[in-house]
Image: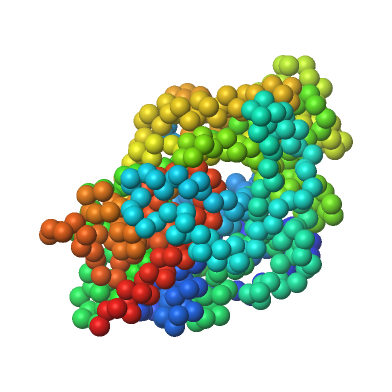
Amino acid sequence: MTTTPTTPNTHTTGPHPTWPRLETEHLPTDADTVIIGSGFGGSVAAARLAQAGKDILLLERGREWIPGEFPDDFASVRRNIRTRHNPMGLFDLALGLDVDRLIANGLGGGSLIYANVMLPPEPEVFNDPHWPEGINLRTLTPYIGRVRAMLRPEHVQRAPKHVEPLTGLAHHHKLPVKPVPVAVNLTRPNEPNPHGIQQNTCTHCGNCVTGCNVGAKTTMRASYLPLAHSAGARIVTRTEVRTIEPSPNPHHRWRLRGWRLNYVGAHYERTPFTLDCTTVILSAGALGTTALLLRSSAAGLALSPNLGHRFSGNADSLALSYNAGITRQAGIGARDQFAPDSEYGPTIARMIDRRNGAHGHLIQDAVIPYPIATMLRRLLAGRFALSGDERIYCDLRPGGCPPGCSAIEHSQLWLAMGTDEANGTVRLGPRGEPTVHWPDAHRQNIYRQQQDDFAHLSETGESIHISNPRHLVRRSGIPAQSPVTVHALGGAAVGPNVDTGVIDRDHRVYTGHGNTTGTAVHPGLYVIDGAASPTSLGANPALTIAALAERAAERLLHHENETP
C-alpha cells in the first residue's frame, strides 16, 4: 500500500536550534528488549533500561520531529492530520458521538503537543480500589522527583494578559489563581540542556500545542530520548506493531508483526515485518497499547477479560469565551513565534484548583495557537456575522484588520480536567483501529460542573459562551457536554489480579489462560504508559505517567535480576 508523505513545515523562519537526529533506518529481525511507543512511558523506560545496560530497540509509528518542522499555519496543521492515507500526520484526531480525542503521532509521543504542565494528582486519587496496594502518591514521590529533575519545570512569573475572567471566577469561589509549573525553558539562556540538546529560551508565542519551533519545550525528544540514545538505545521510526504472539524461536519469547513505512518517491510504501524479542514493553498510549493487545487477543493471545475497560478521558473538557467585552485578552498565539516579549504564552500559565480530594476539577487558561486561531477566526465570525459587531466583521474583512481589533483576539480558550467514572470501553473498529464506546459519558455531573464554571467565565468577560467549538462544525447528534479529551487513560489498567485488571502493580501483563492464582503473568510482557491507569488522575497526567514509568522500569530491572 502506498500513501502520500506528510509535508513538514518548511517556511517558518527564525533561529531554530539544531538538534541531531536520533532515528536509525535499520530495522533488525531480532532484539533483546523492544519498546513500542515513545511517549511519557516509553521514553522514560528506554532511558532507564538503556542506562542499566539493557539492549533496547524503541519502535515509533510516527516520524521524528525537530524544531522548525512543526506546523505554523492552518494549512500545515490540516496537512498533518493523521489519516489512513496520511499515516505520518502529527495530529491523530478521532471525532466520535461519545468522546472526541486527540493524541500525537511522532517520536516523543504526546509530549510533542502537550501544554507542558507538570502537576501531581491529589493523594486521594489512589484511594480508589482499582489501584493496587503499593501505588500511591507517597510511594510515587521519589519518582516524581526524578521526572522533575529531568524536565526542570518552571512557573510563569508574570501574569499573562488573558487571565482577568479567571480571577473573577476565583473570587466567586473564594479560591486563589495559582501559577502552573510548565516544562519549558522560561528563564535559562539559549544553551544545551544536560542531555546535549540546544534549548532556546521561550519567546512566549503561545503555540506550544501545535509543536514548539523555538525549541523551548522540554519534550521527551529533548530529554529522556537523547539520554536513551546516548546510552545505546536504537530508535526506529515509521514502524507500527500490529500484533504480539509467542515466538517459535527458542532464543526469544515474543514475535512482533507489523509494517514499516518507507519513502518511495513521493509516497510511503507499507512493508510487512516480523521481529523476535525476549521482552516487550507496550508504550503506545492508552488507545494504541489497548488496540495492540485487543488485536493480539483476537489472534489468540490469552489476556484478561478486563482488556479495553476502565477507559477515562480524565474528565477533560474545553470551552471558548468569544469576543469579550473587556480589554484585549491576547487569547491567541503569536504569528511570529520569534517575536521577543510577545506575552501570549506559554499555552497554560494559571489555574483555579477546585479539586476536593479525588473529586472536583481544575480550570486552566489556554492560549489558542495561531495556526488554529486562523481557522477559528473565519468559522466563528461566519457563525455570528449577523450580530452587527464591528470586531466580528473585522475577522471577515478580506485582508484582515489591524492587530488587536478582531473578535478572535478578544477571545479565550478554557480547559478543565477532573475525575470521571472511567467506565468507557475501547473496542476495535472494522480496520482494527481503536474506538471508544461510552454512550452516557456526557451525562456525568463533572461535565455539568465544568460547564457552569465555563459559562461564568464567559459572563465575567462579557463574551459569547461556546461550550465546545466542535459544535460549530457538526452539531447534529452531539450532546452539548460531549467530552473531548487530550488525556486518554486506561484500557489496559493495573489491578490486584486478573479479575480486576490487565496488568499487575509492577506493570506485568496477566495471562488469561489457566490463571488459577489470578496473578500469573506473561513473562517479559509489560504495559508502561497511560493505558495502565485505572482511573482519572484529576490533573494533567504527564508527570504521573512518567513517574509510574520510572517506577515500572525500576521494578522490571528488579524482577529480571531475580530471574535465574
Q: Is residue 275 above or below residue 344?
A: below
Colour mode of the rendering: rainbow
In the image, residue 72 lies at what x, y percent?
70, 51
Q: Is 363 or 257 nearer to us in this picture? A: 363
Tell me where residue 297 appears, x and y as whole percent: 24, 56
Q: Residue at x 47, y 56 (%)?
A: 138
Give the quadrant of residue 272.
Answer: bottom left
Horizontal arrangement in the rendering, residue 160 relative to residue 222 (left or right): right
The image quarter in which residue 277 lies: bottom left
Residue 192 appears in which quarter of the rendering?
A: bottom right
In which quadrant of the rendered image does the N terminus lie? Answer: bottom left
Whether residue 403 sits left or right of residue 118 in the image: it is right
Task: Note whether residue 487 is visible.
Answer: no
Q: Which residue is rendered at x = 43% and y = 37% of the image?
A: 420
Q: Is residue 62 above or below residue 540?
A: below
Quick one: which residue is furthest to the right in this view? 402
In this picture, residue 362 sits left or right of residue 94: right
**Residue found at x 61% / y 66%:** 149
- Closer to us: 544 or 93: 544
Residue 161 visible to the viewer: yes
The C terminus lies in which quarter of the figure? bottom left
What residue appears at the point 54 percent right and 37 percent down from the top-left corner? 355
Q: Position of residue 380 (x, y in %)?
A: 67, 28
Q: How many marks?
A: 0
The x, y position of residue 215, in whole percent, is 70, 63
